[in-house]
C-alpha cells in the first residue's frame, strides 16, 4: 500500500520542477553542487573567455570598429553562462518555466501598460523630446549603444539581486501555521499542509530558506520581475517609434541630431530613421531600469507590479516548509 506521505513528497517534487524550483529537490541540488566545483567551473570559464576574446577580435577586424569589442565580449560571456547553467547547473526547468511565464504574461500586457505607462512616460517623454538625448544616441556607435543597453540591464538585475534576498527574509520570517495553509492552497500539498497543522505539527520550523534553495528561489523571482520589465520596455520602445514617427519630422530630427550627412531614414517612411530607432532603444532600456527600481521601492508601483513576485515567493516558501516537514516524517 502506498504511503500518502511519500506520494505527497513526490507530487511536491514534480511541482517544484515544473515551477522552476528544481534546486529544492535533493538529487538536483547535489548535481548542481558538483557542477560548481572549481575543477568543472574553471575550464569552462577559461574557454568562454578565450572564445569571447577571439570573436571580439574577429568582429573588430571585419567591421573595423573597435567599439564593438565590449558588446561582443559581454554577449558571448552571457551566452556561455546561460549554456553552462542549462547543461551543468540543471537550469533547464527554470528557463522552461520562465519562458512559459513570460508568454503567459502577454495577456497582462494591456492592463499593465495602461497602469504603468502614464506615470512612466510623464518622466521619460521629457528625455525623448530633448535635443541632447538625440545628439548623444545619434553619435553612439552600434557597439557602444548595445554595451549601454547591456549595462542598464545588468544594473537592473544587480538591483534585484540585492533587494530580492531581503524579500525572501521578510517572507520566511512570517511563516506560521496559517501562512502555510494559505500559501499551499491550490497546490499538491494543500491537504497535507492542513493535516500537519491539524496534528499540531509546525511546518514553520522549516521556513528558513538558505543555500542553493535560496538562490533558486531568488532566480525564479528575478525571472518573474524581469519578465514584466521586458514586456514594459518593449511597449515603451514601440510607443516611442510610433510617437516619434508621427511628431518628429525629418527637419526636427536633422536639427536635433546635427549629423553632417543628415539622418538615415527609410525611403517609404521618412520620419522613421535609424536615429529614432537608437534613441527609442536607449530610452526603453532606461525605462526598464527605472521601472525595476520603482516596482520594488515606490508604493505606487509596488502594490500593482510586485504583487506577482510576492505571491510566487509566499507559495514557494510555504510549499517548501510543508515538503521538508513531510520528508522529516518519512526519515524517522
Image: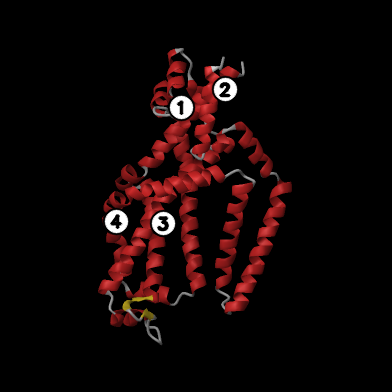
Of the residues tagged 3 and 1, which is closer to the observer? 1
Q: In this rendering, is residue 250 above or below 315? A: below
Q: Is residue 308 above or below residue 331?
A: below
Query: Which element is circle 4 on?
Result: helix
Q: Which residue is located at x 52 percent, y 18 percent? A: 4
Mark closer to the chain start, 2 or 4: 4
- Provide the residue designation for mark 2: 327
Name the spot of residue 282 as percent of width and height, x first. 41, 66
User: Do we see residue 206 in this rendering?
Assistant: no
Q: State the residue at coordinates (34%, 59%).
A: 235
Rendering coords of residue 184 (x, y %): 42, 27
Query: Circle 1 is placed at which residue position?
Result: 188
The disc, 2 or 3, on the residue closer to the chain's N-terminal end is 3
Quadrant where the C terminus sits is top right
Residue 201 numbered tag: none
Q: Residues within 10 Å of mark 3 (few under 14, many from 20)?
A: many
Q: Whole-Å distance between the Cαs marked 2 and 1?
A: 15 Å
From the image, state whether disc 2 or disc 3 is nearer to you: 2
Which callout, 2 or 1, points to the residue nearer the camera?
A: 1
Is label 2 in contact with label 4 (beta carbons under 8 Å)? Answer: no
All told, the count of numbered labels is 4
Instruction: Measure the C-alpha gap from mark 2 to mark 4.
Output: 46 Å
Residue at 49% of width from left, 75% of height from top? 141
Write down the residue under mark 4: 117
Mark 4 surroundings within 10 Å by alpha-carbon count, few (fewer than 14), some (14 through 19), many (20 or more): some
Sort mark 1 into few (<14), some (14-19) or many (20+) by Cα contacts within 10 Å. some
Residue furthest out toward the right: 39
Mark 3 = which residue?
Answer: 289
Amino acid at each position: 500500500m502506498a504511503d500518502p506521505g511519500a506520494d505527497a513528497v513526490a507530487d511536491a517534487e514534480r511541482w517544484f520542477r515544473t515551477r522552476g524550483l528544481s534546486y529544492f529537490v535533493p538529487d538536483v541540488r547535489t548535481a548542481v553542487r558538483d557542477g560548481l566545483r572549481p575543477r568543472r567551473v574553471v575550464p569552462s570559464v577559461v574557454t568562454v573567455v578565450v572564445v569571447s576574446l577571439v570573436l571580439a577580435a574577429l568582429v573588430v577586424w571585419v567591421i573595423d570598429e573597435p567599439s564593438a569589442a565590449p558588446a561582443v565580449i559581454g554577449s558571448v560571456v552571457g551566452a556561455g553562462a546561460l549554456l553552462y547553467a542549462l547543461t551543468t547547473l540543471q537550469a533547464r526547468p527554470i528557463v522552461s518555466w520562465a519562458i512559459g511565464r513570460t508568454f503567459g504574461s502577454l495577456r497582462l500586457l494591456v492592463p499593465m501598460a495602461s497602469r504603468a505607462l502614464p506615470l512612466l512616460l510623464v518622466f521619460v517623454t521629457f528625455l525623448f523630446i530633448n535635443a541632447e538625448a538625440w545628439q548623444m544616441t545619434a553619435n553612439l556607435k552600434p557597439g557602444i549603444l548595445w554595451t549601454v543597453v547591456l549595462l542598464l540591464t545588468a544594473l537592473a538585475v544587480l538591483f534585484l539581486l540585492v533587494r530580492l534576498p531581503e524579500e525572501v527574509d521578510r517572507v520566511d520570517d512570517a511563516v506560521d501555521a496559517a501562512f502555510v495553509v494559505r500559501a499551499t492552497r491550490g497546490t499538491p500539498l494543500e491537504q497535507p499542509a492542513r493535516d500537519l497543522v491539524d496534528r499540531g505539527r509546525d511546518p514553520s520550523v522549516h521556513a528558513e530558506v538558505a543555500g542553493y534553495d535560496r538562490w533558486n528561489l531568488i532566480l525564479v523571482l528575478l525571472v518573474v520581475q524581469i519578465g514584466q520589465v521586458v514586456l514594459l520596455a518593449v511597449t515603451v520602445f514601440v510607443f516611442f517609434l510610433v510617437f516619434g514617427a508621427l511628431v518628429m519630422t525629418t527637419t526636427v530630427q536633422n536639427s536635433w541630431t546635427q549629423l553632417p550627412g543628415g539622418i538615415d531614414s527609410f525611403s517609404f517612411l521618412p520620419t522613421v530613421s535609424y536615429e529614432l530607432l537608437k534613441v527609442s532603444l536607449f530610452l526603453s532600456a532606461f525605462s526598464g531600469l527605472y521601472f525595476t527600481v520603482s516596482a520594488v521601492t515606490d508604493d505606487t508601483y509596488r502594490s500593482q507590479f510586485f504583487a506577482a513576485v510576492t505571491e510566487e515567493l509566499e507559495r514557494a516558501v510555504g510549499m517548501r516548509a510543508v515538503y521538508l516537514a513531510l520528508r522529516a516524517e518519512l526519515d524517522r
